[in-house]
Image (spheres, helix red, strand yellow):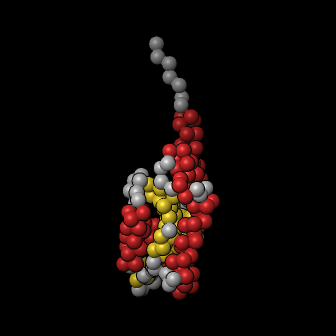
Amino acid sequence: VQIFHDNSSRIAARNVIEKLRKLAMIDPLTGLANRRYLDKVIDSKTDEMKRYNFSFGLVFIDIDHFKNVNDRYGHDVGDKVLWSVAQNLSTMVRSSDIIGRWGGEEFVAVVLNLEQEELEAVAEKMRKTIEALEIPGNGSPVNVTISLGATLAKAENGLDKNGILRKADELLYASKNQGRNRVTLG
């Protein structure tokens, strides 16, 4: 004797839940993690830093003069720029690292298991790659640069999550104030 159960509604419900989970955690334009997901990752890594003395790198990334891209080429090209920058940045990090869109034209990378010099090398590689990128525009290629603020979060620095975020943000603005298209480490 065999008994069959129709599990199609349960499977459909699981599929809907998975789609909703992705919508809640993934930026629809870039396909990267969104701010909500990044926030959870940074919470987790900050807890690990305090509990186990694991350090991690936090990199704030901003596309320089992005408003000019939208004004000059239109929002469609602006979206292409965001997508292209996102895809290229995602190739710069390891599978254990997380990169996502923080909002607007800002991205954040959480880079694990490295020291200050390695963090600087990763950030500089990101900067150079985006600087060399040519994105198809309306008849002519669009070139953009990025400014980066990078900090190595360590337990001995005594910073909580908000302090780490504030420090990376301040370093990003230092890059912008020093002429853009640069990495500022701290």
User: Residue 83's x, y, as percent?
Assistant: 47, 69
Q: Quadrant of the rendered structure where residue 174 is?
A: bottom right
Q: Residue furthest top?
A: 1
- Determine the residue positioned at 55% across, 82% down: 177
Residue 115 makes an appearance in the image: yes
Total labels: the figure holds: 0
User: Residue 155's x, y, as percent?
Assistant: 53, 53
| Foreground residue among 107 and 155 | 155
Look at the picture and state if 179 lies above or below 82.
below
Horizontal side of residue 46 vs 119, given as left or right = right
- Determine the residue positioned at 51% across, 83% down: 178
- Determine the residue positioned at 55% across, 48% down: 50
| Foreground residue among 5 and 86 | 86
Q: Quadrant of the rendered structure where residue 111 is?
A: bottom left
Q: Residue furthest front?
A: 156
Q: Quadrant of the rendered structure where residue 75 is?
A: bottom right
Residue 22 makes an appearance in the image: no
Look at the picture and state if 158 lies above or below 135.
above
Look at the picture and state if 136 lies above or below 17.
below
User: Residue 150's x, y, as percent?
Assistant: 49, 67
| Foreground residue among 117 and 168 | 117
Horizontal side of residue 113 vs 151, given as left or right = left
User: Residue 129's x, y, as percent?
Assistant: 37, 73
